[in-house]
């Protein structure tokens, strides 16, 4: 498969790209900026709708005020998500034209369908946010429902493409050509899709849940703790607290699937050089000289976790040429970060649930609220670390075992210029998002009817 | 009609809709740039912004639609275009980022200075993006994008007479469309001052667009003769004449203050230019690459067509709803009514329900853990995952997050 070319003659002459690493970093940057916004796209509309539903049921104006304030945050984050997502689709061509040219007809359908999900989200977010007080309450509530559904179908499609890149099928290679293309089998007949989808979907609720709860926890520490704040705190935190322990189970399932479908990624995650029976698992440590140093070894744990068997054989990095191995320490560090933070989040979630059930109230310890303040950004770190694990762990392949990333990259010059520009622009975006969120948070609480005048007249 | 051409027709339709709808968004930004300073300029800018804010995201998605259809159905052409034209496409992308961020920011601004800064960035990016996209289209039309990974020239592929002409045309057409739409919106708002302002802008921009289009034919004659010769013979000529007549009709309609009809004729004039380009260039997509050869295998094409038609069946009623609300003025300032009187106030769940839900949730958690973590078949995993998701939903019901806060104590 070594010298794969495009369907037509696009890559007949392989390109030399001196800045492959920069192209990968640019992609990683674009992705890391977009993916937190995806979490809000997945989970936040459901939270806003829940609050609105409470208003419709109880007539309590507090819920209306909360839903309207949250929907301002929703529309601001969605706007940024729209553009950062657009950048990702541009980069499919700008950075990886030969990947798209070679396999577009295999995986592209997923994005084409995703485009319609995106349409639904954009249309109904417009109706929902600008329709406050202008549609009947029921119609307004209903206009939010497609946003929640499209958030799910959109992530289903994007994950289907990513799952295909990790575990490609639905085509054959005849010589240098991609033939026998079956997009549906490639995208949806892929076992790798399901754990990845559920893992990401839960991550969306966990990240959005902890991040929405965090500022109210901070407010609690500063003494802002009226019924409004308590409500705004309890709803997202309850969701995240329930999802975080489940994520540990789903993550374990994902790891077992990776063990069978991508043994070299697993070997990189664990820093396992030699193919081993009854392989140990190393916590922490650093991979150097073909082994993990300074780590805590737990005998047989890897075989047990990955294959549910005391003496199962685990493939090591030695089973493939050095040029086909991912950068071990990046993948290991990312994986351990994700698992470490994920476990702590699950513990925090369980503490909350136990207090809730046993004492029938919210936790009162200040340490709990400090922990929630940290959990918001920490969940974001875990999210990005998880994606680093799966994406860097797939390297050096863009299509696992089929096409090297170096065969996919653009031949155009100027990658470092584009990268530098994007860094500057995204720093500006970061500042802008921080500014708008602070501004929205500081808007005075006031009873509804008169509410988000900026939305109406200004934005 | 061959199957292999159908996705391209979808993509060109999407492109026309992007220019007609998304273009007007950019145009509104351009009018913010030219509004100048002072109170009147502020009114112009606010009107241009408010009219587009509810729909810009939906309008923007047409661009994504075009990209995804092209890379699925004509992957080689997409790879060649995106790599050779990487510079203008990147510039367009940066413009899109800046515009989106300013949309997000505008809902939080409070001072005039902040507003000027945000509107300034918005306006400049509104100029940048249509020009860059138009220049990229010019590179394709003038056969400067060969097949291959960045096989064309990084700069002359989009800095050439045809590209610059089409880029300029894209900017002016965007401004023209926006002015027509904004005039219509001003009438709906009953603001005759705004109407006069945008009417004048529509007439000026429309005339400039016409002039560029006519001058553009001379540019094409010199720079892209093969395209020119097919534009001035049937069927390209029919589209060209159609565009010219629709353009003149629009000017007449705007002159007579009939903006609602002018909306459609202006859009038609622009769509006809795109149709003319497509007709003049087919059956060739890129030099040496026909549409038939560029097309993906049969099964992919069938699936793309099915996906687009099925998607359109959901999309168009949704779009009709959005634009219906917008054009009937339901999103206008001052239409908001106060919240309805409190609802039933009834308890959502009876007192015993949370306990029951909690037990069900625990059951789901135990079953899900067993099926997902201990059992080893795909079916067991699927049921296990569903159990765990049910645990979250039932658990949320049982936890009653909105009830517990009132049990928490006094308001402080």
Image: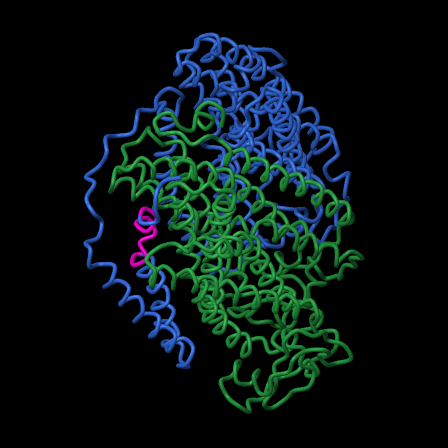
Chain colours: A green, B blue
Q: Nearer the viewer, residue A124 or B261?
A: A124
Taking the image as shown, residue B132 lies to the left or right of residue B299, namely right
Residue B69, image x, y percentages: 52, 49
Residue A270, image x, y percentages: 63, 77
Q: Does residue A147 appear anywhere in the picture?
A: no
Q: Is B332 rendered above or below residue A108? A: above
The image shows a total of numbered marks equal to 0
Q: Is A436 rendered above or below residue A334? A: above
* Magenta span contains residue B198: no
Q: Nearer the viewer, residue B126 or B401?
A: B401
Residue A290, image x, y percentages: 75, 81
Q: Residue at x 75, y 77 (%)?
A: A322
Give the residues drawn in magenta, as a range.
B397-406
Q: Does residue A189 appear anywhere in the picture?
A: yes
Q: Is B276 rendered above or below residue B65? A: above
Q: Quadrant of the N terminus of chain A?
A: bottom right
Which of the 4 image quarters holds residue B378? Answer: bottom left
Q: Is A348 rendered above or below residue A94? A: below
Which of the 4 image quarters holds residue A362? Answer: bottom left
Q: Residue at x 19, y 59 (%)?
A: B352
Taking the image as shown, residue B105 lies to the left or right of residue B384, namely right
Which of the 4 image quarters holds residue A59? Answer: top left
Q: Residue at x 61, y 24 (%)?
A: B114
Helix, strand or loop: magenta stretch:
helix
Residue B304, image x, y percentages: 46, 53
């Amino acid at each position: 498969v070594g010298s794969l070319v495009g369907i037509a003659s696009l890559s007949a002459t392989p390109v030399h790209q001196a800045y492959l690493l920069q192209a990968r970093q640019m992609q990683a940057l674009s992705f890391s900026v977009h993916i937190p916004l995806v979490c809000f796209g997945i989970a936040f509309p459901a939270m806003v709708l829940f609050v609105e539903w409470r208003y419709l049921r109880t007539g309590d104006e507090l819920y209306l005020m909360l839903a309207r304030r949250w929907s301002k945050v929703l529309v601001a984050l969605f706007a940024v998500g729209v553009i950062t997502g657009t950048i990702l689709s541009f980069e499919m061509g700008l950075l990886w034209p030969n990947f798209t040219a070679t396999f577009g007809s295999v995986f592209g359908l997923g994005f084409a369908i995703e485009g319609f999900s995106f349409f639904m989200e954009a249309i109904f977010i417009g109706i929902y946010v600008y329709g406050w007080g202008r549609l009947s309450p029921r119609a307004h509530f209903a206009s939010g429902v497609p946003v929640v559904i499209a958030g799910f179908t959109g992530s289903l499609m994007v994950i289907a493409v990513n799952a295909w890149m990790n575990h490609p099928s639905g085509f054959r290679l005849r010589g240098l050509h991609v033939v026998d293309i079956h997009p549906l089998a490639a995208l949806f007949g892929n076992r790798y899709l399901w754990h990845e989808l559920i893992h990401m979907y839960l991550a969306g609720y966990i990240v959005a849940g902890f991040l929405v709860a965090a500022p109210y926890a901070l407010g609690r520490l500063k003494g802002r703790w009226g019924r409004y704040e308590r409500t705004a705190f309890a709803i997202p935190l309850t969701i995240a607290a329930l999802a975080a322990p489940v994520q540990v189970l789903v993550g374990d399932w994902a790891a077992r699937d990776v063990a069978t479908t991508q043994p070299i990624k697993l070997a990189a995650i664990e820093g396992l050089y030699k193919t081993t029976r009854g392989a140990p698992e190393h916590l922490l440590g650093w991979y150097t000289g073909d082994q993990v140093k300074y780590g805590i070894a737990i005998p047989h744990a890897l075989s047990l976790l990955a294959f549910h068997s005391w003496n199962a054989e685990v493939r090591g990095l030695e089973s493939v040429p050095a040029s086909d191995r991912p950068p071990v320490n990046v993948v290991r560090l990312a994986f351990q970060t994700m698992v470490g933070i994920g476990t702590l989040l699950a513990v925090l979630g369980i503490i909350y649930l136990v207090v809730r059930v046993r004492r029938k109230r919210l936790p009162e310890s200040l340490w709990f609220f400090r922990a929630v303040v940290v959990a918001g950004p920490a969940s974001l770190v875990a999210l990005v670390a998880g994606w680093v694990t799966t994406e860097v762990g797939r390297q050096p392949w863009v299509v696992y075992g089929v096409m090297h990333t170096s065969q996919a990259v653009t031949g155009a010059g100027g990658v470092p210029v584009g990268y530098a520009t994007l860094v500057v622009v995204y720093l500006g975006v970061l500042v802008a998002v921080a500014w708008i969120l602070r501004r929205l948070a500081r808007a005075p609480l006031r009873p509804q009817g008169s509410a988000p005048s900026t939305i109406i007249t200004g934005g | 009609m061959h199957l292999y051409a159908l996705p391209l027709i979808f993509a060109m339709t999407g492109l026309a809709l992007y220019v007609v709808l998304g273009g007007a968004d950019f145009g509104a930004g351009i009018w913010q740039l030219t509004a100048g300073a002072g109170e009147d300029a502020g009114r112009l800018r606010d009107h241009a912004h408010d009219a587009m804010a509810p729909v810009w995201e939906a309008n923007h998605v047409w661009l994504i639609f075009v990209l995804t259809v092209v890379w699925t159905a004509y992957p080689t052409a997409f790879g060649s275009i995106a790599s050779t034209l990487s510079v203008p496409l990147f510039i367009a992308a940066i413009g899109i980022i800046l515009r989106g961020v300013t949309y997000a920011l505008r809902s939080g601004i409070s001072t005039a200075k902040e507003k000027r800064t945000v509107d300034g960035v918005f306006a400049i990016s509104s100029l940048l993006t249509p020009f860059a996209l138009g220049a990229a289209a010019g590179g394709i039309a003038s056969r400067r994008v060969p097949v291959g990974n960045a096989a064309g020239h990084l700069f002359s592929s989009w800095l050439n007479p045809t590209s610059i002409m089409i880029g300029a045309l894209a900017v002016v057409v965007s401004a023209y469309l926006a002015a027509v739409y904004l005039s219509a919106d001003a009438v709906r708002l009953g603001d005759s001052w705004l109407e006069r302002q945008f009417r004048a802008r529509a007439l000026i921009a429309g005339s400039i667009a016409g002039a560029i289009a006519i001058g553009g034919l001379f540019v094409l004659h010199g720079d892209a003769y093969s395209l020119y010769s097919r534009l001035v013979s049937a069927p390209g000529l029919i589209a060209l004449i159609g565009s010219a007549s629709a353009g003149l009709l629009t000017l007449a309609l705007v002159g007579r203050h009939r903006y609602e009809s002018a909306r459609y004729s202006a859009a038609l004039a622009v769509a006809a230019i795109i149709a003319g380009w497509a007709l003049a260039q087919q059956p060739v997509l890129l030099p040496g690459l026909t549409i038939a050869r560029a097309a993906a295998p049969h099964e992919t094409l069938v699936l793309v067509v099915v996906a687009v038609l099925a998607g359109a069946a959901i999309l168009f009623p949704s779009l009709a709803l959005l634009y219906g609300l917008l054009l009937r003025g339901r999103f206008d300032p001052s239409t908001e009514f106060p919240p309805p009187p409190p609802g039933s106030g009834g308890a959502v769940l009876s007192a015993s329900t949370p306990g029951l839900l909690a037990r069900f949730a625990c059951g789901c958690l135990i079953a899900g853990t067993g099926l997902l973590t201990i059992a080893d078949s795909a079916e067991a995993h699927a049921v296990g995952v569903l159990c765990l998701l049910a645990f979250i939903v039932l658990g949320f019901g049982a936890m009653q997050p909105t009830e517990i806060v009132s049990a928490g104590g006094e308001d402080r």
